[in-house]
Amino acid sequence: MDSFPLEPDRAAMGEMGGLVLGRVMDFVESLPDRPTGNTTDPQETADLVKSFLAEPPEEAGDLTALLDRLERAVECSLETAGPGYLAYVPGGGLYSSALAEFYTRAVNRYGSLAMVAPALTALEESVLRWMARDVCGLPEGSTGLLTTGGSMATFSAVVAARHQRLGEDLTGGTAYVTAYAHHSVAKAARLAGIAARNVRTVPCTADLRMDTEAAAAMISADRAAGLRPFLLVGSAGTTGTGAVDPLPALAGLAEREDLWFHVDAAYGGFFRLTERGRRRLAGTERADSVTLDPHKTLFLPFGTGALVVRDPATLYAAHEGTGDYLQDLGSADGLPNYAHLGPELTHEVRGLRAWIPLHLHGVAAFRDALDEKLDLAERVHDRLAGLPALEVPWRPELSTVAFRVRPRDSGADAVEEADRATRHLLDRINDDPRVLLSSTVADGRQTIRVCVVVHRTHADRIDGLLDRISTLVAA
Ligand SMILES: Cc1ncc(COP(=O)(O)O)c(C=O)c1O
């Protein structure tokens, strides 16, 4: 057994790195054949959980043995990196981004105050400006903050909106979302001190998109009742069905009513790199702030979200804070101090995990991959819509297709029976270790969803899924 000191020499670094890299390459190569579900039996899972809850030992361990243990822990999970992961909103995890992350962690530069590492701050800023301007279409001067995920991005957006529109007195501040908005919006509002009763659920039209007229009526009624409407949130792709709210109409409403307009583009945002996505997500460019999630549709590993804002001064006004112990660290010309744009002080240089993939593969590689996902979703829609046993109520605007068992008639009993059959169908589909789908409730009905986002998912996997569904519903 080799034991490694806290500061390994070159030979030891090579040995440690080689051991880890070898496992990682084996893992990535095995992805097409790995089962999507967790195949570890309950007793072994319980044993593994117990062993991992143990405290660290006094004496040194063996890296090979630790990696063996880790491999078992990785196996005891859903396969969220593989081509068959079509559940929730997947994130594949680019190998190049994992390498960038290793580099970031090894050089351990401080990413929060620009003067400490100006060129690396510029690198992160270039990623943010690209997301704000090229991806979202916000004007020159817009930028933002890389976060740990979409929820944190939305939290800072709501805090900025609250600070700008309500000031210190939050009384009566009301926000507007639909029932299909991601729950992180209501959570962010609550964390930001907005009363839960003042997060209004605006009705949807039959296509599950926010009803703009209903929103306008609610805002007027609330204002007349002495409340203070301040925030309107549109979804650029809901988690459940991928529906896109009528963003241009909502932008117009927010302008007329002087509300902050936030677009939750955590799922949909990067589809704007494609021609179809840009058309379907038009209106995003009129937002005050946009949540993006590079760990979804930019294929980065989990742990990276982004908030981009039209006017960075609004983020700064809401989050700025400093202490005497930071007096030696001034500012760097033209570069932001990210510590003043969000809740965290210390954080790593987050930009590298996107900057390396974008510069290494080129933006066109991402555009092509996202276009492929849109094509695959249309393929799913067209095949499933041809199966009489199924209802496929909405043509996908992005890469999510929702479907369910068609009730034999419109009576309540028939609908209940179809809902049970839908859940049964999901279980049967997921019996196949090559795919994993998840479900939601849409329009009050049990609904299965296929969400194609992993960069490793291609037509072969989707065709296998479609063949299986056809066989199951024909049986
Ligand atoms: C539309 C939407 N918004 C926000 C989020 C929350 O993002 P995160 O899980 O990165 O915090 C999700 C997550 O799936 C989402 O789909």
Image (cartoon, rainbow, N blue to C red):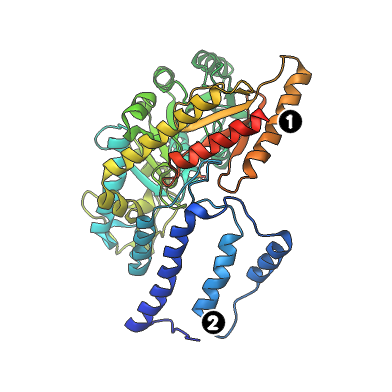
Q: Position of residue 177 (x, y in %)?
A: 54, 27
Label 1 crowding class (10 Å Cα cut-off): few <14, some 14-19, many 20+? Answer: few
Mark-to-mark CA distance, 2 and 1: 51 Å
Q: What residue is pinned by disc 1? A: 420
Q: What residue type is labelled 2?
A: Gly
Q: Mark 2 points at which residue?
A: 61
Q: Is 124 placed left or right of 63 in the picture? A: left
What is the secondary structure assignment of the residue under circle 2? loop
Identify the residue shown where x is 39% and y is 20%.
248
Of the pair 121 and 96, the residue shown nearer to us: 96
- Helix or strand or loop: what does disc 1 sit on? helix
**Which quadrant holds the C terminus?**
top right
| Residue 199, visible in the rendered structure | no
* Residue 204 visible (yes or no): yes
Find residue 405 and report its image quarter.
top right
Residue 326, given in percent of the width and then of the height, sits at: 35, 62
Residue ID at (55%, 77%):
65
Residue at 66% across, 71% down: 51
Q: Which of marks 2 and 1 is nearer the N terminus?
A: 2
In x, y percent, where is residue 92?
A: 45, 49
Q: Which of 114/262 is in front? A: 262
The answer to which of 474 and 286 lies nearer the viewer is 474
Give the image location of residue 7, x and y in percent. 39, 82
Establish if 361 lies above or below 205. below
Residue type indicated by callout 1: Arg
